[in-house]
Image (cartoon, rainbow, N blue to C red):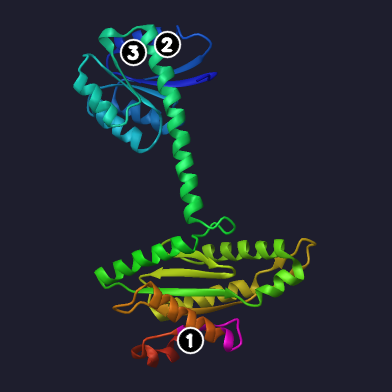
Amino acid sequence: MEQKLLKVLICDDDPADRKLVRKYLEKIPDREIVLLEAGHAEEIQDALDKGRIDLVLMDNQMPGKSGMEWLAEIVGRNLAPVVMLTGSGSEEIAVQALQEGAIGYLSKSALSPEKLIRAIDTALDKWARLQQARADREQLERLANFDPLTSLYNRQAILGKLRELINRAQRYDEQLAVIMLDIDHFKKVNDCYGHLTGDDVLEKLANLIRANIRSTDIAGRYGGEEFIILLPHTDLLSARVVAERLRKMVENAEMKDSAGNTFCITVSQGISSWEAGDDAYALISRADEALYQAKKNGRNRVEMSFNPKIEGRLQTSNELVE
Protein backbone atom coordinates (compact mmCIF):
# COMPACT_ATOMS: atom_id res chain seq x y z
CA MET A 1 0.00 0.00 0.00
CA GLU A 2 1.65 3.23 -1.14
CA GLN A 3 1.62 6.05 1.37
CA LYS A 4 3.81 9.16 1.35
CA LEU A 5 3.69 9.82 5.10
CA LEU A 6 3.38 7.08 7.68
CA LYS A 7 2.96 7.78 11.40
CA VAL A 8 4.23 4.80 13.37
CA LEU A 9 3.98 4.48 17.15
CA ILE A 10 6.52 2.11 18.67
CA CYS A 11 5.57 1.03 22.19
CA ASP A 12 8.48 -0.61 23.98
CA ASP A 13 10.01 0.04 27.40
CA ASP A 14 13.48 -1.02 26.16
CA PRO A 15 15.32 1.95 24.54
CA ALA A 16 17.67 -0.46 22.74
CA ASP A 17 14.75 -2.25 21.08
CA ARG A 18 13.19 1.07 20.06
CA LYS A 19 16.51 2.16 18.58
CA LEU A 20 16.74 -1.08 16.57
CA VAL A 21 13.22 -0.67 15.19
CA ARG A 22 13.98 2.96 14.33
CA LYS A 23 17.09 1.86 12.46
CA TYR A 24 15.15 -0.71 10.47
CA LEU A 25 12.34 1.74 9.66
CA GLU A 26 14.86 4.17 8.24
CA LYS A 27 15.74 1.54 5.65
CA ILE A 28 12.22 1.53 4.17
CA PRO A 29 12.52 3.11 0.70
CA ASP A 30 10.11 5.56 -0.95
CA ARG A 31 8.24 6.35 2.25
CA GLU A 32 8.48 9.16 4.75
CA ILE A 33 7.99 7.87 8.28
CA VAL A 34 7.19 9.86 11.39
CA LEU A 35 8.20 7.68 14.32
CA LEU A 36 6.64 8.24 17.74
CA GLU A 37 8.21 6.41 20.68
CA ALA A 38 6.53 5.44 23.93
CA GLY A 39 8.18 3.60 26.80
CA HIS A 40 5.42 3.70 29.42
CA ALA A 41 1.65 3.92 29.74
CA GLU A 42 1.39 7.71 29.97
CA GLU A 43 3.38 8.17 26.75
CA ILE A 44 1.26 5.61 24.90
CA GLN A 45 -1.99 7.19 26.04
CA ASP A 46 -0.75 10.65 25.12
CA ALA A 47 0.25 9.52 21.62
CA LEU A 48 -3.10 7.80 21.04
CA ASP A 49 -5.05 10.82 22.24
CA LYS A 50 -3.18 13.36 20.13
CA GLY A 51 -4.41 12.28 16.72
CA ARG A 52 -3.97 9.97 13.77
CA ILE A 53 -1.70 6.97 14.10
CA ASP A 54 -1.21 4.83 10.99
CA LEU A 55 0.44 1.85 12.67
CA VAL A 56 1.24 0.69 16.20
CA LEU A 57 4.16 -1.63 16.95
CA MET A 58 3.31 -2.92 20.42
CA ASP A 59 5.65 -4.85 22.68
CA ASN A 60 3.80 -7.58 24.54
CA GLN A 61 5.66 -6.90 27.80
CA MET A 62 4.82 -3.32 28.81
CA PRO A 63 4.99 -1.97 32.38
CA GLY A 64 1.77 -1.09 34.15
CA LYS A 65 -0.51 -2.18 31.32
CA SER A 66 0.30 -5.17 29.16
CA GLY A 67 0.60 -5.08 25.41
CA MET A 68 -2.49 -7.29 25.15
CA GLU A 69 -4.47 -4.77 27.20
CA TRP A 70 -3.33 -1.94 24.96
CA LEU A 71 -4.20 -4.07 21.93
CA ALA A 72 -7.76 -4.55 23.22
CA GLU A 73 -8.18 -0.80 23.75
CA ILE A 74 -6.79 0.20 20.37
CA VAL A 75 -8.88 -2.40 18.56
CA GLY A 76 -11.97 -1.48 20.57
CA ARG A 77 -11.60 2.17 19.57
CA ASN A 78 -10.70 1.25 15.97
CA LEU A 79 -7.71 3.59 16.16
CA ALA A 80 -5.01 1.88 14.09
CA PRO A 81 -3.64 -1.47 12.98
CA VAL A 82 -1.46 -3.13 15.62
CA VAL A 83 1.53 -5.40 14.99
CA MET A 84 2.54 -7.16 18.20
CA LEU A 85 6.22 -7.56 19.11
CA THR A 86 7.62 -9.99 21.66
CA GLY A 87 11.04 -10.99 22.87
CA SER A 88 10.18 -14.66 22.45
CA GLY A 89 8.79 -16.53 19.51
CA SER A 90 5.89 -18.03 21.44
CA GLU A 91 3.23 -19.36 19.09
CA GLU A 92 0.70 -19.16 21.92
CA ILE A 93 1.24 -15.40 22.26
CA ALA A 94 1.00 -14.97 18.50
CA VAL A 95 -2.34 -16.79 18.37
CA GLN A 96 -3.70 -14.81 21.30
CA ALA A 97 -2.63 -11.50 19.71
CA LEU A 98 -4.28 -12.33 16.41
CA GLN A 99 -7.44 -13.49 18.19
CA GLU A 100 -7.54 -10.17 20.08
CA GLY A 101 -7.39 -8.22 16.83
CA ALA A 102 -3.72 -7.70 16.04
CA ILE A 103 -3.06 -7.31 12.32
CA GLY A 104 0.37 -8.95 12.55
CA TYR A 105 2.93 -10.46 14.87
CA LEU A 106 6.75 -10.34 15.00
CA SER A 107 9.36 -11.90 17.24
CA LYS A 108 12.08 -9.41 18.15
CA SER A 109 14.62 -12.22 18.40
CA ALA A 110 14.27 -12.88 14.68
CA LEU A 111 13.60 -9.30 13.59
CA SER A 112 15.15 -7.98 10.37
CA PRO A 113 14.53 -4.97 8.12
CA GLU A 114 12.94 -7.23 5.52
CA LYS A 115 10.58 -8.90 8.00
CA LEU A 116 9.61 -5.56 9.53
CA ILE A 117 8.92 -3.95 6.15
CA ARG A 118 6.91 -6.96 5.01
CA ALA A 119 4.89 -7.01 8.25
CA ILE A 120 4.15 -3.30 7.97
CA ASP A 121 3.06 -3.48 4.33
CA THR A 122 0.88 -6.52 5.03
CA ALA A 123 -0.65 -4.84 8.08
CA LEU A 124 -1.47 -1.62 6.23
CA ASP A 125 -3.00 -3.49 3.32
CA LYS A 126 -5.10 -5.71 5.59
CA TRP A 127 -6.18 -2.69 7.67
CA ALA A 128 -7.31 -0.81 4.56
CA ARG A 129 -9.38 -3.80 3.47
CA LEU A 130 -10.88 -4.19 6.95
CA GLN A 131 -11.81 -0.52 7.06
CA GLN A 132 -13.44 -0.73 3.65
CA ALA A 133 -15.38 -3.81 4.74
CA ARG A 134 -16.49 -1.95 7.87
CA ALA A 135 -17.64 1.02 5.78
CA ASP A 136 -19.51 -1.31 3.42
CA ARG A 137 -21.29 -2.99 6.35
CA GLU A 138 -22.26 0.36 7.82
CA GLN A 139 -23.58 1.50 4.46
CA LEU A 140 -25.63 -1.68 4.05
CA GLU A 141 -26.98 -1.29 7.58
CA ARG A 142 -27.92 2.31 6.87
CA LEU A 143 -29.67 1.37 3.63
CA ALA A 144 -31.54 -1.37 5.46
CA ASN A 145 -32.64 0.73 8.44
CA PHE A 146 -32.84 4.38 7.43
CA ASP A 147 -35.04 6.35 5.08
CA PRO A 148 -32.72 7.87 2.44
CA LEU A 149 -34.65 11.16 2.18
CA THR A 150 -35.16 12.06 5.83
CA SER A 151 -32.36 9.98 7.43
CA LEU A 152 -34.90 8.83 10.02
CA TYR A 153 -35.55 5.15 10.69
CA ASN A 154 -37.62 3.53 7.95
CA ARG A 155 -40.88 1.70 8.59
CA GLN A 156 -39.36 -1.71 9.19
CA ALA A 157 -36.66 -0.39 11.52
CA ILE A 158 -38.98 1.85 13.58
CA LEU A 159 -41.37 -1.06 14.09
CA GLY A 160 -38.42 -3.11 15.33
CA LYS A 161 -37.51 -0.33 17.77
CA LEU A 162 -41.13 -0.17 18.95
CA ARG A 163 -41.17 -3.90 19.66
CA GLU A 164 -37.94 -3.54 21.65
CA LEU A 165 -39.45 -0.73 23.74
CA ILE A 166 -42.65 -2.70 24.31
CA ASN A 167 -40.63 -5.68 25.55
CA ARG A 168 -38.78 -3.37 27.93
CA ALA A 169 -42.04 -1.77 29.10
CA GLN A 170 -43.47 -5.20 29.83
CA ARG A 171 -40.36 -6.37 31.65
CA TYR A 172 -39.84 -3.31 33.82
CA ASP A 173 -43.38 -1.88 33.88
CA GLU A 174 -42.22 1.31 32.16
CA GLN A 175 -44.31 3.93 30.41
CA LEU A 176 -44.23 4.33 26.65
CA ALA A 177 -46.09 6.66 24.29
CA VAL A 178 -46.40 6.75 20.51
CA ILE A 179 -47.10 9.77 18.30
CA MET A 180 -48.36 9.32 14.76
CA LEU A 181 -47.84 12.51 12.75
CA ASP A 182 -49.17 13.32 9.29
CA ILE A 183 -48.70 16.42 7.12
CA ASP A 184 -52.03 18.10 6.39
CA HIS A 185 -52.95 18.34 2.70
CA PHE A 186 -49.51 17.18 1.57
CA LYS A 187 -50.86 16.34 -1.88
CA LYS A 188 -51.52 20.06 -2.39
CA VAL A 189 -47.88 20.80 -1.63
CA ASN A 190 -46.77 18.41 -4.36
CA ASP A 191 -49.43 19.67 -6.79
CA CYS A 192 -48.71 23.38 -6.20
CA TYR A 193 -44.95 23.41 -5.71
CA GLY A 194 -43.71 20.16 -7.26
CA HIS A 195 -42.38 16.92 -5.85
CA LEU A 196 -38.87 18.28 -5.28
CA THR A 197 -40.32 20.89 -2.96
CA GLY A 198 -42.42 18.15 -1.37
CA ASP A 199 -39.21 16.22 -0.67
CA ASP A 200 -37.67 19.36 0.86
CA VAL A 201 -40.70 19.69 3.13
CA LEU A 202 -40.35 16.09 4.31
CA GLU A 203 -36.65 16.60 4.98
CA LYS A 204 -37.22 19.85 6.88
CA LEU A 205 -40.00 18.29 8.93
CA ALA A 206 -37.68 15.41 9.84
CA ASN A 207 -35.10 17.94 11.03
CA LEU A 208 -37.74 19.73 13.12
CA ILE A 209 -38.74 16.44 14.71
CA ARG A 210 -35.12 15.57 15.52
CA ALA A 211 -34.53 19.00 17.04
CA ASN A 212 -37.60 18.86 19.28
CA ILE A 213 -37.42 15.41 20.85
CA ARG A 214 -35.09 13.97 23.47
CA SER A 215 -32.00 11.96 22.61
CA THR A 216 -33.76 8.91 24.06
CA ASP A 217 -36.80 9.34 21.79
CA ILE A 218 -36.87 7.60 18.42
CA ALA A 219 -38.37 8.99 15.21
CA GLY A 220 -39.09 7.27 11.94
CA ARG A 221 -40.78 7.81 8.60
CA TYR A 222 -43.73 5.46 8.66
CA GLY A 223 -44.61 5.99 5.03
CA GLY A 224 -45.29 8.84 2.59
CA GLU A 225 -45.93 11.98 4.65
CA GLU A 226 -46.58 10.04 7.87
CA PHE A 227 -44.08 9.89 10.72
CA ILE A 228 -43.94 8.03 14.01
CA ILE A 229 -42.25 9.11 17.24
CA LEU A 230 -41.55 6.70 20.10
CA LEU A 231 -41.34 8.26 23.57
CA PRO A 232 -39.97 5.86 26.22
CA HIS A 233 -40.59 6.64 29.90
CA THR A 234 -43.42 8.97 28.84
CA ASP A 235 -47.10 8.94 29.74
CA LEU A 236 -49.94 10.06 27.49
CA LEU A 237 -50.25 13.58 28.87
CA SER A 238 -46.51 14.25 28.71
CA ALA A 239 -46.54 13.00 25.13
CA ARG A 240 -49.29 15.50 24.38
CA VAL A 241 -47.03 18.32 25.57
CA VAL A 242 -44.32 17.10 23.16
CA ALA A 243 -46.81 16.83 20.30
CA GLU A 244 -48.26 20.28 20.90
CA ARG A 245 -44.81 21.84 21.01
CA LEU A 246 -43.93 20.13 17.77
CA ARG A 247 -47.23 21.15 16.16
CA LYS A 248 -46.55 24.81 16.92
CA MET A 249 -42.96 24.58 15.68
CA VAL A 250 -44.13 23.14 12.37
CA GLU A 251 -46.95 25.68 12.01
CA ASN A 252 -44.48 28.55 12.45
CA ALA A 253 -41.75 27.09 10.24
CA GLU A 254 -41.19 28.74 6.88
CA MET A 255 -41.05 26.49 3.83
CA LYS A 256 -39.75 27.53 0.41
CA ASP A 257 -40.25 26.30 -3.12
CA SER A 258 -37.56 26.22 -5.83
CA ALA A 259 -38.38 29.81 -6.81
CA GLY A 260 -37.96 31.08 -3.26
CA ASN A 261 -41.67 31.52 -2.58
CA THR A 262 -42.54 30.86 1.06
CA PHE A 263 -45.44 28.88 2.45
CA CYS A 264 -46.39 27.05 5.65
CA ILE A 265 -47.60 23.58 6.49
CA THR A 266 -49.43 22.07 9.44
CA VAL A 267 -49.50 18.59 10.92
CA SER A 268 -52.10 16.46 12.66
CA GLN A 269 -51.06 14.04 15.38
CA GLY A 270 -52.52 11.09 17.21
CA ILE A 271 -51.12 9.72 20.47
CA SER A 272 -51.44 6.41 22.27
CA SER A 273 -49.74 5.01 25.34
CA TRP A 274 -48.71 1.48 26.18
CA GLU A 275 -51.02 -0.61 28.34
CA ALA A 276 -50.32 -4.09 29.67
CA GLY A 277 -50.85 -6.63 26.91
CA ASP A 278 -50.40 -4.17 24.02
CA ASP A 279 -48.31 -5.22 21.07
CA ALA A 280 -46.96 -2.90 18.37
CA TYR A 281 -50.09 -3.30 16.27
CA ALA A 282 -52.37 -2.25 19.15
CA LEU A 283 -50.31 0.83 19.99
CA ILE A 284 -50.08 2.00 16.39
CA SER A 285 -53.74 1.28 15.73
CA ARG A 286 -54.86 3.47 18.62
CA ALA A 287 -52.48 6.26 17.62
CA ASP A 288 -53.72 6.00 14.05
CA GLU A 289 -57.34 6.22 15.21
CA ALA A 290 -56.47 9.34 17.20
CA LEU A 291 -54.73 10.78 14.13
CA TYR A 292 -57.89 10.16 12.11
CA GLN A 293 -59.89 12.07 14.72
CA ALA A 294 -57.41 14.96 14.55
CA LYS A 295 -57.95 15.24 10.82
CA LYS A 296 -61.70 14.80 11.16
CA ASN A 297 -61.83 17.56 13.79
CA GLY A 298 -60.17 20.16 11.60
CA ARG A 299 -56.49 19.19 11.26
CA ASN A 300 -53.50 21.03 12.76
CA ARG A 301 -54.33 19.51 16.12
CA VAL A 302 -53.44 16.72 18.52
CA GLU A 303 -55.83 13.97 19.62
CA MET A 304 -55.27 11.15 22.11
CA SER A 305 -56.40 7.59 22.48
CA PHE A 306 -56.31 7.22 26.22
CA ASN A 307 -57.06 4.88 29.06
CA PRO A 308 -60.41 5.95 30.64
CA LYS A 309 -58.70 6.01 34.06
CA ILE A 310 -56.91 9.24 33.14
CA GLU A 311 -59.79 10.93 31.37
CA GLY A 312 -60.53 13.08 34.40
CA ARG A 313 -57.01 14.52 34.29
CA LEU A 314 -57.27 15.83 30.75
CA GLN A 315 -58.76 19.16 31.75
CA THR A 316 -55.77 19.85 34.02
CA SER A 317 -53.35 18.92 31.26
CA ASN A 318 -54.84 21.53 28.91
CA GLU A 319 -53.18 24.22 30.99
CA LEU A 320 -49.80 22.79 30.00
CA VAL A 321 -50.33 22.84 26.26
CA GLU A 322 -52.69 25.71 25.50
Label 3 crowd bin: few (<14), some (14–19), many (20+), radius 10 Å: many
Residue displayed at 47% across by 74% down: 179
Q: Mark 1 points at which residue?
A: 319
Question: Tag on residue 180?
Answer: none
Residues at marks 3 and 1, CA–CA distance in whole angstroms: 71 Å
* Magenta-span inclusion, residue 163: no
Task: Identify the magenta region.
Answer: 295-304
The image shows residue 97 at horizontal and vertical percentages of 27, 26
The reply to whether residue 234 is visible in this rendering is yes
Residue displayed at 32% across by 29% down: 42
Residues at marks 2 and 1, CA–CA distance in whole angstroms: 72 Å
Q: Quadrant of residue 90?
A: top left
Decide which of 57, 223 is in the foreground and name it.
223
Tag 1: amino acid: Glu
Residues at marks 2 and 3, CA–CA distance in whole angstroms: 10 Å
Q: Name the residue under label 2.
A: 25
* Marks 3 and 1, the one that precedes in the sequence: 3
Tag 2: amino acid: Leu
Q: Mark 3 points at which residue?
A: 18
Tag 3: amino acid: Arg
In the figure, 7 relative to 163: above or below?
above
Residue displayed at 43% across by 81% down: 286
In what element is the residue under mark 3?
helix
Label 1 crowd bin: few (<14), some (14–19), many (20+), radius 10 Å: few
